[in-house]
Amino acid sequence: MLFLAKAIGTTVAGAYCETNFLSSFSSSATLSRSDGTTSVSVSPFFGLTPLILSGLGFWAFAYGMNVGVARNKAMEAAKKDGEKDVKERYDLPNLYVQGTSKHARVFNCIQRSHQHIFETYPTIIVTGLIAATQYPIFAAGTTLMYAVGRISLSNGYAKSDGDASKRYENSSFARYMWYGVLINLLLSFLSCANIIAGKKLI
């Protein structure tokens, strides 16, 4: 409940500050085609949010390659330790390794560190872009908060030595991912309300 209260308070405070103190920086600029037929008004700061999201997407793509390397290492280690049915348990198309051996647990945490990304990434893309239409500076900040927390949490999972309960112990930034998700959700709702109302509500 405290987490939700903090997120709501931060959302309201951030939106208020951008509207009342940063509006001169985040004012819209008009973009148009050379023939002048189409124009769209956006703040120059709008581009920060998709830039952060694109960078995070590239990181997720590169990070996925680490999972393949980790799978091969885990298979080799399991073979050396005499585990049974290693190829059937560890190899693709298995997403996770069956069993609770040390090597299976270590790999499964690494796999989870990558899989977990996609549980929140689609949401942060949609809400971040919606929020950036009305609050481009604040939305960029909260999206960056998510990105830093997301990377930290994935690294925490991967370095947990097979004990997923340690995923938050390895980074002090990991929990900020959840603030980024929730604040962007709330900010996107507020941005939609602004658009429907035809004015800034906060």
Image (spheres, rainbow, N blue to C red):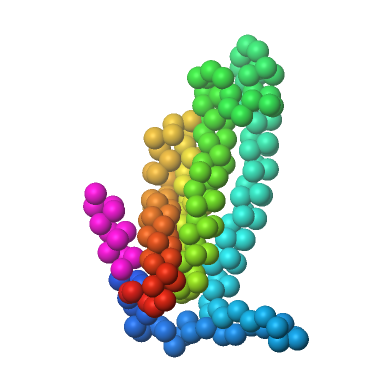
Residue drawn at x 65%, y 13% is 85
Q: Position of residue 62 (x, y in %)?
A: 66, 49
The reply to whether residue 142 is visible in this rendering is no
Where is residue 142 drawn, in percent x and y?
A: 43, 64
Residue at 58% across, 57% down = 56
**Which quadrant of the figure has residue 93?**
top right
29 is higher (above) or lower (below) than 70:
below
Along the horizontal axis of the image, is 150 left or right of 17?
right
| Residue that extends furthest to the right in the rendered view of this protein | 35
The residue under the point 70% across, 83% down is: 37
Q: Nearer the viewer, residue 106 or 193?
A: 193
In the displayed structure, does residue 11 sit left or right of residue 143? Answer: left
Residue 13 in sight here? yes
Judged by its main secondary structure, the magenta piece is helix
Q: Quadrant of residue 51?
A: bottom right
Percent x, y for residue 132? 49, 69
Location of the C terminus by quadrant is bottom left
Check the image and report above or below for 90 versus 49. above
Q: Pick whichever, 89 or 191, lies toward us.
A: 191
Q: Is residue 120 above or below residue 94?
A: below
Q: Which residue is pictured at 50% across the width and 72% down the height?
A: 133
Q: Is residue 175 left or right of residue 37?
A: left
User: Left or right: 101 with respect to 55?
Assistant: left
Q: Residue 41: horizontal and vertical position, in percent?
A: 56, 81
- Magenta segment boundaries in residue numbering: 1-12
